[in-house]
Image (cartoon, helix red, strand yellow):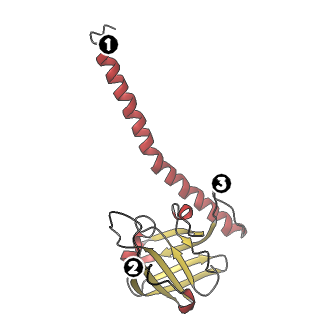
Amino acid sequence: MNVKHPKAACLFALIGAVGLIISLISLWVPVKAQLAQYLLESSWNHYQQTGKNRKPWPWADHHTVAQIQVPRLGLKQIVLAGDSGRSLAFAPGVNERTDINGSAMVISGHRDTHFRFLEHLTVNDPIFLILSSGRREFKVVGYEIIDSQKRKLSPQRFRNGLILVTCYPFDAVTAGGPLRYVVFAKSV
């Protein structure tokens, strides 16, 4: 092969290699997200069949405890035990201070991923929560935007309820503000 400009050829090859590496790195996040959802589903299926918790991957600090379904939106999502940042990166999570089989439950999720659907819920929408104790049906009764620095949620004041919480506003450029979008659903 006759190369008249070896420096240009090397530069071209280097640019191509860097472009390939960047492309592979950018694909890693979506591939990892899809794999995580598959592993969560597998963990949930195991829990449904055996009643025993199984971590979705060996180093996970969470396990599946429920599935939330919103038929009108065609939505089914796994719910994890705990709502730490590590858990919420993969799925919505039950607040550690609530009993998943108790009378009032708080489930949190990220506004720009799993709980993006909250803005599309309307009053009277049915929500189903599949638990180890069976299927519970809820109906949306309202929503509220609260400032988490001025007011704390009190699940005990919403007996037999389901409280879904995410950050607000949904389209905020930066995350982490004090506002929360809270959906209240009563047991049917």
Q: Earlier in the sequence, mark 3 or mark 2?
A: 3
Q: Nearer the viewer, mark 3 or mark 2?
A: 3
Find residue 6 and name its label. 1
Find residue 59 and name its label. 3
User: Which residue is at a point 32% across and 23% down the rendered structure image?
Assistant: 12
Q: Which percent across, then down, holds residue 129?
A: 56, 78
The relative height of residue 95 versus residue 30 in the rendered view (above or below) is below
Spatial CA distance of label 3 from label 2 is 34 Å
> The residue under label 2 is which amino acid type?
Leu
Q: Which residue is mark 2?
A: 121
Q: Which percent across, then down, holds residue 162?
A: 52, 83
Tell me the element at label 2. Answer: loop
Spatial CA distance of label 1 from label 3 is 48 Å
Quadrant in which residue 23 is drawn: top left
User: Which residue is at a point 32% across and 22% down the rendered structure image?
Assistant: 11
The relative height of residue 148 versus residue 114 in the rendered view (above or below) is below
- Count the marks: how many? 3
Q: Which percent across, then down, holds residue 62?
A: 63, 63
Tell me the element at label 3. Answer: loop
> The residue under label 3 is which amino acid type?
Trp
Q: Which percent across, then down, holds residue 17?
A: 39, 29
Residue closest to the far left: 4
Q: Nearer the viewer, mark 2 or mark 1?
A: 1
Spatial CA distance of label 2 from label 1 is 61 Å
> The residue under label 1 is which amino acid type?
Pro
Q: Residues within 10 Å of mark 1 (few under 14, many from 20)?
A: few
